[in-house]
Image (cartoon, helix red, strand yellow):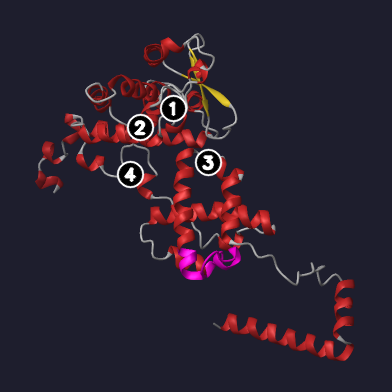
Amino acid sequence: MPIYDEQVDHIVSLETSLQQLAEQFGPLQLKEALYRQELLPEMQPIPENPKVLPLSEAVEHYLASDAFTDLARSSQEAYRYEINMFVSFCHKMKGQDPNIKEVSTPTFLKEYLTPVKKKNTRSKKAAFLRSFLRETLDYFFQQGIEGLKNTLEVTPDKKRTEPRAFEKEQIDELLTNVKLGREAHRNFTILWTFLGTGIRLNELCNLQVGDINPSGKKIYVRGKRNKEFKEPCNITDSALDILCSYINFRYSDLKNSPNYKDLFVFSDDKGVSPLHDSTVQKMITNLIVEAKTIKEDDKKNYQFSVHSLRHSFALYLLESGVNIYTIKELMRHKWLSSTEIYLQLFNKMLVEAINKHPLGQLKISDFFGSAVYG
């Protein structure tokens, strides 16, 4: 408190002195003197009528911007949902189509986020608001969101920081069970493609017939960073054989059609459009739920998912002796730090494995008695 009081006294004293100088020499001369001494920065004129940007116009701009269209399809859907939630709240609190400046203050945004108790849900909302406000405020007002970052803090969910990979017996069961369900051929191929490439969900769904290069033993995917260009991705021989066999079974009668290479490999409408992400997610989730080798606790949220197949691909490369730099290239990671997390997971698995050794369960008291080491 004394420090705060001293600071306030200094400000009051300064303001009093400036007021006395202004009264003695006039405010205009005082201002010019401060400019000449370079003690006062050149001020931009404040417009008499600051621009009013309706929320609807801000939303329309955002949905057409690169900040939104460059997102993965699943992220776009999530952000559309968040837009609807935020707009509804704004209309309720500020009336129909309020000014964007009214709904982008720290106080208003706190009011919107505070009722959200789950950290992960709140982080998702904050991430959307950061993207939305960064784009619209910069475009229309040349203004950043530095003053909002504390309010829109994104806290990573601790439950999701460590990747989960399937054990080999679990993968065996998934591959067995997938052949017993509906769309068995397609779903078996999807599962093998994940396991043989480590590609992401969005990359798999957007695979087209022309992206498969059997002679080069590669497939081409729209990567996470450069969605305008397709990048090569390695594939195991077994996964390539299964993928090519499926394409031949599915589209052999269309090989002479002009758009053959543009057909989507996994599709519900004869290759015209890609299979929806949620269809694959639901299929993998059902396999996880049915698996007897997966513990019930591991079937809960934030445990195993589609992305666990990518983690499994990386982890078993590491277990097979492939060096971390090669794995980085196979995973198409931009930074080595993204790949090094698998080293931590692998080391943890080794510790758990050694402790399952029969001799690892023995205590020193089993040899020398509890009387000495009690």
Badge nearest the viewer, 4 or 1: 1
Residue 293's place in the image compared with 64, above or below, is above
**Amino acid tagged 4:** Tyr
* Left or right: 157, with 93 as reference point: left
Instruction: Please name the residue that numbered disc 3 is placed on.
Output: 71
* Left or right: 14, with 26 as reference point: left
* Left or right: 19, with 209 as reference point: right
Instruction: Please name the residue that numbered disc 2 is placed on.
Output: 280
Q: Residues within 10 Å of mark 4 (few under 14, many from 20)?
A: some
Instruction: Work out whether mark 2 precedes mark 1 in sequence or the reverse, and give the earlier one.
Output: 1
Q: Distance between the residues labelled 3 and 4?
A: 22 Å
Instruction: Work out whether mark 4 precedes mark 1 in sequence or the reverse, and give the earlier one.
Output: 1
Residue 155 visible, this orientation: no
Instruction: Please name the residue that numbered disc 4 is placed on.
Output: 302
Q: Which residue is drawn at 25% across and 23% down?
A: 172
Proximity of marks 2 and 1: CB atoms separated by less than 8 Å: yes
**Amino acid tagged 1:** Leu
Instruction: Please name the residue that numbered disc 1 is placed on.
Output: 204
From the viewer's side, name the closer residue of 208 and 273.
273
